[in-house]
Image: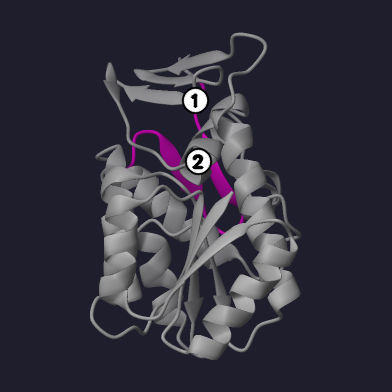
Amino acid sequence: MKILVVDDEREIADLIGLYLKNEGFDAVCCYDGNEALCKIENEKFDLAVLDVMLPGVDGFSLCSKIREKHKFPVIMLTAKTADTDKISGLSLGADDYMTKPFNPLELTARVKAQIRRFYQYNEPAADTDIMEISGLEVNGSTHICKLYGQELDLTPIEFGIIRLLCKNAGRVVSTQEIFETVWGEKYLDSSNTVMVHIRRLREKMHEKPKNPKFIKTVWGVGYKIEKES
């Protein structure tokens, strides 16, 4: 597995690279956004770790560039108090974030979890698993989601959320259940993470924010998709 690590603080980038290499990953370290952009355009990666504040092209721009062509997981590194950075990164398609300072062992664990989840969602399922609700089709075998016949360009996290909601159509799925099922991690304070991904899903489905047809918000509890009547 080839991991792109981008941080303008060489000590941090090299430390992350060292921990990843110790776990058997091929870590490629870059120290500015322009160098990273060149790597993204010319090499194949399985995951990227991006610092937000970078000289040249910043982490947000890099994340956007990645999402134009690739679906591999992206983990953003943000300043400890920059909640807006976390939300912005998730809105642009990042799968996870960590605040500085962080434990390199935890970051390594998150890298492993993201890669495991990515390949889990992209491996063909043994049995056909197709759900259709009012023009929304979710195929668990091919991991393709279509709306009125048009394929939606979803990340593995987004697909995991829509699949979970469809499998539980008619039932409210709590924010905690969504996070622990899709992310595979213990839910602590991750409501914003789920909320941002739900918002991105709605945007891709061209849902009206105040009156969505498919993904309904049940305030203080979670989200639901109604069964087809």
- Pointer 2 with pointer 1, Cβ within 8 A: yes
Question: Residue 24: x, y in percent?
Answer: 71, 56
Marks 2 and 1 sit apart, C-alpha to C-alpha, by: 8 Å
| Point 40% across, 34% down: residue | 214
Q: Amino acid at mark 2?
A: Pro
Q: Tell me the magenta residue range.
A: 210-227
Q: Can residue 209 be spotted in the picture? A: no
Residue that label 2 marks: 156
Instruction: Relative to 53, say whether 67 is above or below.
Output: above
How crowded pointer 2 is (Cα within 10 Å; few <14, some 14-19, many 20+) is rated as: many
Residue name at image x 45 percent, y 53 percent = 197
Q: Nearer the viewer, residue 126 or 211?
A: 126
Label 1's element?
Answer: loop
Q: Is residue 142 left or right of residue 32?
A: right
Q: Report the residue at 36% width, 84% height from top.
A: 53
Above or below, comparing residue 13 to residue 70 in the picture: below
Sequence-wise first label, 2 or 1: 1
Q: Position of residue 223 (x, y in %)?
A: 54, 45
**Image-quadrant location for residue 15:** bottom right
Give the number of the disc on residue 143: 1
Q: Is residue 136 above or below residue 31?
A: above
Q: Please state if 121 lies on the left or on the right of 90 as rendered.
A: right
Element under disc 2 = helix
The three-letter code of the residue at mark 1 reads His
> Horizontal and vertical percent for residue 23?
74, 60
* Residue 228 as seen in the image, left or right of residue 204: right
